[in-house]
Image (spheres, grey):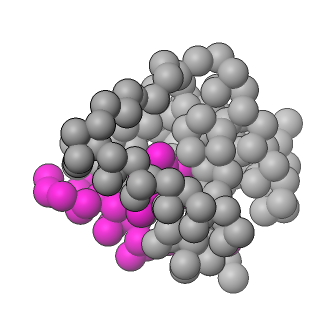
Amino acid sequence: MGKAAIWVDADACPKVIKEILFRVAVRAEMVVTLVANQALFAPPSPFVRSLQVPRGFDVADQAIVERVAEGDLVITADIPLAAEVIAKGARVLTPRGEPYGPDTIQAALTLRNFMDTLRSSGVETGGPAAFNHDDRRAFARELERFVVKAGRRVE
């Protein structure tokens, strides 16, 4: 297994999360790749990259699935994408700091599918709570755990 990398489902990733990732990429010397169907800002760094893919349903997701390797981390709130990359041996962290792995993804996928069924039958399920400071802290804490497990220094 090579060096672990971080892949970001960047179209809907909050700016503050991207900024945390940019800092960690440089400090830990770990490649972070933003994947989106639009041009994104990526600071000049040998450790930060961006990959613009064509527009289309799940095109960015499939680009991540094709490139992710065992031991990598994917930042996404997309549960079906999370399930696909976990099947390839990667880990997943949501922008809110929720880690998913082989032992937790099935429950998340089941809940997501249940909520989709409710919404399609006309039930108002509401949306997610607004992104807040606690979410940012939880993300930073879980990201640090991943980086440390990957054997990288974070100063």
Q: Position of residue 134 (x, y in %)?
A: 69, 21
Residue 50 visible in the shown view: no
Q: Is residue 76 left or right of residue 106?
A: left
Residue drawn where x is 23% and y is 47% of the image: 121
Q: Is residue 121 magenta?
A: no
**Between residues 145 and 122, which one lies in front from this camera angle?**
122
The tally of labels here is 0
Q: Position of residue 59 (x, y in %)?
A: 23, 62
Whether residue 5 is situated above or below residue 89 in the rendered picture: above
Q: Quadrant of the C terminus?
A: top right
**Between residues 21 and 112, which one lies in front from this camera angle?**
112
Residue drawn where x is 59% and y is 61% of the image: 107
Q: Is residue 58 magenta?
A: yes
**Between residues 55 and 102, which one lies in front from this camera angle?**
102
Q: Is residue 101 left or right of residue 127?
A: right
Q: Is residue 17 left or right of residue 33?
A: right
Whether residue 60 is situated above or below residue 123 in the rendered picture: below
Q: Which region of the structure is painted magenta?
A: 51-80
Residue located farthest toward the left when viewing the structure as drawn: 55
Q: Quadrant of the N terminus?
A: bottom right
Q: Position of residue 33 (x, y in %)?
A: 47, 53
Whether residue 71 is situated above or below residue 112 in the rendered picture: below
Residue drawn where x is 71% and y is 45% of the image: 143
